[in-house]
Amino acid sequence: MKPKVIALIAITVCGRLGAEQFTPLVLPTLTENILNWTDGAAYAPLYPSSAPTLGGIPFSFQTDGRGNNIFYGGSLGAPVSADLHIPVGIYGATAVYTLINTAYGTSGSVVGSVTFNGTGGLTYQLDLVEGFNVRDHYWGGFENGTSDPSTTQAVYGINAPGNAHYDMQKFTLPAGFSSETLTEIIFSSTGVGFPNGKPFLAAATVASTSVPDTGGTLGLLSLSLVGMAWLTRRGFKS
């Protein structure tokens, strides 16, 4: 086998082991129709369903039989605590991208959390804080800014007064998840409501970089490396 062919095999195998993959998730429960919220018409192109790429990340949007298209733990008139359990089942997850904003919002208020559970007893939780990683979905009289560099403002919509928008959060998972399966994501609301803020989830996508290997991929890589070493000793003769 010629050295160029063996090198190509090695590069291909390494690509298979390290290529980043994105998996948009389906939200199992939807409770509100964002189109009825302030400036909700701005979101109309996304519904009843779509699969756009926002901020370089693919997302999936759905609408249920009642016309709901986001998860919000209670009604605007009577906020209540609520959790959304999202089944995942993805091996080697490295990050989770979400589209989370709030109704209302007062800077510094802890309005919810996102928890990531994995095999091997892994769990990782992060708070949702107004003015840090979440803000009101509408630029008006409540919290309109974020300071977390992992939050990208207005990946959909207009980032200016008088406009609605979706912001994207990137939650980087601890290294332990790279060799385990991300089993579940739990989106939680504190239920604090007006005026502190109450979060909603519009979409989520999981990034992963590896898959369990049954021996074939690593075996092919080992074979190619042995072949390259043998050709090196022979002076790359063909």
Image (cartoon, rainbow, N blue to C red):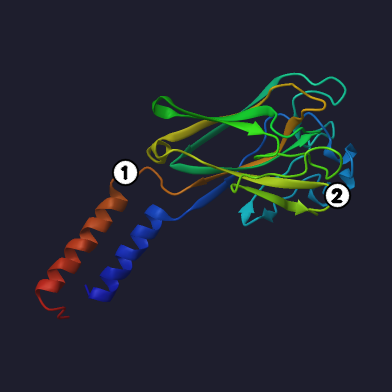
**Is residue 154 left or right of 98 when viewed as pictured?**
right
Can you give x and y, in whole percent of width and height, for residue 191 in the image? 74, 21
Q: Which residue is at a point 61% across and 44% down the rendered structure image?
A: 148
Residue projecting furthest to the bottom: 237
- In the picture, residue 188 is in which quadrant? top right
Can you give x and y, in whole percent of width and height, for residue 173 in the image? 48, 39
What secondary structure is marked by label 2?
A: loop
Residue projecting furthest to the left: 233
What is the total number of numbered labels drawn onto the structure image?
2
Q: How crowded is mark 2: few (under 14 residues within 10 Å), some or many (20 or more)?
A: some
Q: Which residue is at a point 65% across and 45% down the rendered structure image?
A: 147
Q: Residues within 10 Å of mark 1 (few under 14, many from 20)?
A: few
Q: What kind of residue is marked 2?
A: Asn
- In the picture, residue 140 is in which quadrant? top right
**Is residue 223 left or right of 31 when viewed as pictured?**
left
N-terminal label among 2 and 1: 2
Picture quarter with the N terminus: bottom left
Q: Name the residue under label 2.
A: 163
The CA span between labels 2 and 1 is 50 Å
What secondary structure is marked by label 1?
A: loop
Can you give x and y, in whole percent of width and height, for residue 48 in the image? 81, 44
Closer to the camera: disc 2 or disc 1?
A: 2
- In the picture, residue 192 is in which quadrant? top right
In the rendering, which numbered label is found on residue 76?
Answer: none
Q: Between residue 195 and residue 214, name the one nearer to us.
A: 195
Q: What kind of residue is marked 1?
A: Thr
Q: Between residue 171 and residue 214, name the one nearer to us.
A: 171
Q: In this view, does 116 lie above or below 8?
A: above
Q: Mark 1 points at which residue?
A: 214
Picture quarter with the C terminus: bottom left
Can you give x and y, in whole percent of width and height, for residue 202 in the image? 72, 39
